[in-house]
Image: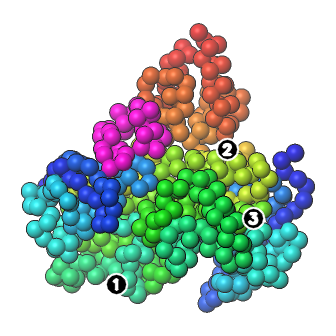
Amino acid sequence: MVTVKIENLSYSYKDSATSVLHDISLSFSSGERVAIIGQNGTGKTTLTKHLNGILTPDTGRVLIDNVNVENKTTAEWASKVGYVFQNPNDQLFLDTVKKELVFGPSHLGIPKKEIQKRIRFVSELVGMQEELAEHPLNLTDSEKKFCAIGAVLAMDPNVVIMDEPTGGQDKSGKYRLAKILEYLKTQQKICIVVSHDMRFVTENFDRIVVMANGHILLDGAPKEVFSNPQVLKEAFVTPPPITDLAQKLGWETTILSISEFIEELKKRVQ
Amino acid sequence: MKVSSKDVISVNNFSFSYPQTKKPAISSMNFTVKEGEFFCIVGANGAGKSTLCDSLVGLIPQYFLGTTKGQVLVNGQETTKQTVAELSLEIGLVFQNPFNQLSYTTSTVAEELAYGLGNHGIPRSEMLDRVAAVAKKMRIESLLDRDPLTLSGGQIQRVAFGSTYILNPSILVLDECTTQLDPIGSEEIFTIIKQLNDEGVTVVMTDTETERLSMYADRILLLDNGLQMGVDKPQAIFAREDLEKLNISTPLNYQLTQELTKIGILDSPEFNQDIILEKIKEVENGYR
C-alpha cells in the first residue's frame, strides 16, 4: 500500500515573477491510475517533478507514505517513486538497453539473481526483449520511451510517474502502454500519467485531473470530467472525438465509446 | 481549383539505407505531390515516415549519409543538386522532435525564429516584421523574450514550426508536429496548416494519429516497414482490410460511421464531422 498527498503546494521558477503552481492539494492511493491533462505550459510536468523531490515547493508539502519528500534526496526516493521523463534523451545515458534496465536495481543493492529476474520480466512487459544489446541511441523515439519506462519499472517503485508517454506512439505502442498500466494496477501501484491523448486517457484511466494556469480545474472519473466541455476549454482540452460528437448532437448523456454511442442512438430512434 | 495539376514533388523509385544496415529504411518509393495538395503519410512507428520526410527536404542524403537509389525532385530539381539551406526556401521541414530542430545558439525565442532569416541575409527591419507576424500566428507572442530552453514541450513545438514557416516555403513538410501539443493547441496548429494550405501552400504531413489527418487529407500514402502500400483518397485507405495488420488506428468517427452503416443508419462511412452530425440529426428527426 502506498499513499501520495500533495498539500497546498505552490511553486514558481527562479527568475520568474509569476508562479507556476498555486495552492495545489491532491491525494492518491494504491491502485489508482490518474491522468493529468491540460494546456501546454500549465504546470503538469512541474507538478509531477515535486513527487520525487526534483523540485521542492515554495510553500506546502508533498508526503509519500506520510514522509515529507524533502526529507530525502531524489536518489533515495528513486526506489519508491519512479519518474519517466517526457524526453527520453534526458534520461538514457548508458550504452546498452540492458545496462539502462540494470542500473537502477543494481544501485539499490538488489541481488544479481533478482535483478536478472526483473530484467527478464520488465523487458518483456515493455517489449524490449529483442533490443537488450542495442545502444539506446539506435532506438526509435518510441522505443526510447519504452526503454526509459523499463529502466524505471526495473526498480519496482510503488509510485510510477510518466510524463507524456503517449506522444508519438502508434497503435501498438499505445496498446503496450495500456498493458503496462493494467499491470501496475494489479500490483496496487499508483500510476500518474501526463498526457494529451484524450482517447487514450478515456480508455485507460479511472481518474482525470484537469489543470489550467497552475490550478486544478476538475478532478474526477472520465465521465464527470468530459461532461463539461465549456470548463475543459479553459484548460485547452477537448473531449475525445466520440464524446464531442454526442455533445454537438445535444445529447445529455456523456458518451465515451462507440458502443455507448450506438446504444444511445438506438434508444433515441426507437 | 485548390490542387493544381503541377507536380511539386516527384519521388522516382527512391530507396535509402542508413550506414551499416542491410535493409533499406525505405525502398522503391514512387509518388508525386501536386501543387496545393494536402498530402499525408501514414504508417506505424518504424515504417519510414521520418526517413521519407528527411529525403524530401534533402537532409537525406546530404546530412544523414547512406546509400540512395532513384531520385527526389522538388519543383523539378533534384534535391542533391541544391544545398539543404537553398532548399529550405522552397520546402521547409518541421521536425518530429522539436529539440532536434532548435539551433541551440540563440537566447530568446525571437532570435530563434529569426535564425533562418539571418542565414538568408534578410534585412533587420523585415526580420522584425516577419518575427512578429509568425509569433502572432503561432500564438507565442508572450514568449518572444524567453530562453527557448526554458519553454514547455508544446511551446517549443510551436517555436519550431514558426522557425520553419518564417522562411515562407511553398511546400511544408510536417513530421508528427503535434505530438506534444494539448488538444486545442493541436487543433489550432491543424487550423493554421489548413489555412496555409487554403492559401496555396503544399502540405506533406505525417502522423500516427489518423483522427484529424483523415479529415484534411486529399490523399494518403500508406507506409509499412519501408514499403509503399498505396497512395489513395482517405476513403479508400481507411476501407482497407489490412489496416489492423499494418498497425494503423482507424479514426474514431470513421469507425462509428462504419458501425452505423452496418446497422443501416447511414449509407456509407464518413470522416467529416459536420456531415456525420447532419446525417445523425436527420435520422433522429425522422423518428420524432
Amino acid at dot 1: Lys
Part of the protein shown in magenta: A210-239
Q: From the viewer's perspective, tell me whether residue B205 is left or right of residue A118.
A: right
At numbered mark 2, what does the secondary structure look like: helix, strand or loop?
helix
Residue at mark 1 shares a chain with residue at mark 2: no
Residue under label 2: B215
Residue B61 vs A201, above or below: the answer is below
Residue under label 1: A99
Q: Nearer the viewer, residue A175 or B153?
A: B153
Q: Nearer the viewer, residue B119 or A139?
A: B119
Residue B84 vs B269, above or below: the answer is below
Q: Which chain carries label 2?
A: B
Q: Which chain carries label 1?
A: A
Q: Which chain carries label 3?
A: B
Query: Going by the picture, which residue comes out furthest to the top?
Result: B288
Residue under label 3: B169
Q: In which quarter of the image is residue A97?
A: bottom left
Q: Nearer the viewer, residue B204 or A109?
A: B204
